[in-house]
Amino acid sequence: MPGTGDGGPSRSGGGAVTRSTLRQQVADALRDEVLAGRLQPGQEFTVKEIADQYGVSATPVREALVDLSAQGLLDAVQHRGFEVHPYSLDDYREMIEARGIVIDGIFRDKRVEDGPRTTAVLAAVRRRGEEARRAATAGELNILIGYDLRFWRELSDLFGNPYLADFLHRLRVRTWVCAVQHLRRLPDLRGQLWAGHTGLVDALVRGDTQTAHEIVADHNADCLALVERLAAGQPE
């Protein structure tokens, strides 16, 4: 199935694709299409069109589309199917503000405890951060988005409670969806994208919440300034 990145649907021990697995893979594939900008804001499609595209039955597709609607990525269009939710610049500003508040809540006055599991998780998070930095420096947006989402998810799972971590993940997906439509206008994204992932990890490991707060605040300000500039038709 396109967009899953694992070579196709997972199968149970009996060799059959489970509905829940297929539902999630369809949802993941469609989310990737939106994040890549291949499904544009306001673009409409039907359950049948998606089912035919992926060669699966209508039921898991319908369930996946409902899931993505609940996440704010799609809207149900009466008698016509679904469309990609068209986020506005004001939406983006408010989401940036919201994710800043959530991140402050996750990382405030918290320092991870030493231990084998923590060491392993931090090593994995750092690898994601390094890959995200490389992708940002090279202007490789699709690669950056994937590593960035995993970085923040794993980092917030380590430091914060799971409910805030899940909410932050959804917010970051939405902000990327909103930003992508503007970022695609730039022919060259090198040097334009935030690459401070590893610096944030270092500050949090030290327990330096003030520096971590400043890094996150600068990140949000840079993201907002870039998207506002592009939305105003000022690519340079």
Image (tube, rainbow, N blue to C red):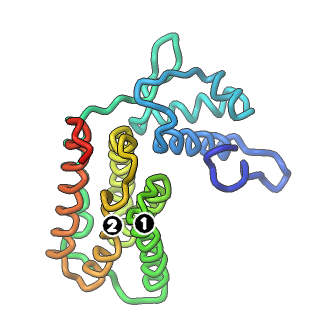
Quadrant position of the N terminus in the picture: top right
At horizontal 43% and vertical 82% (from top left) the residue drawn is: 118
Q: Is residue 102 above or below residue 158?
A: above
- The residue depicted at 30 percent of the width and 83 percent of the height is 205
Looking at the rendered structure, which numbered label has been put on residue 132?
A: 1
Residue 195's tag is 2
Marking on residue 209: none
Badge 2 vs badge 1, beta-carbon distance below 8 Å: yes
Q: Position of residue 147 (x, y in %)?
A: 46, 62
Foreground residue, 6 or 188? 188
Is residue 16 toward the left or the right of residue 73 in the image?
right
User: Outermost residue toward the top?
Assistant: 79
Q: Position of residue 223 (x, y in %)?
A: 25, 53
Q: Badge 1: how crowded within 10 Å, few (<14), some, or many (20+)?
A: many
What residue appears at the point 38 percent right and 52 percent down from the top-left corner? 188
Helix, strand or loop at mark 1 = helix
Amino acid identity at mark 1: Ala
Left/right placement of residue 86 relative to residue 23 reads: left
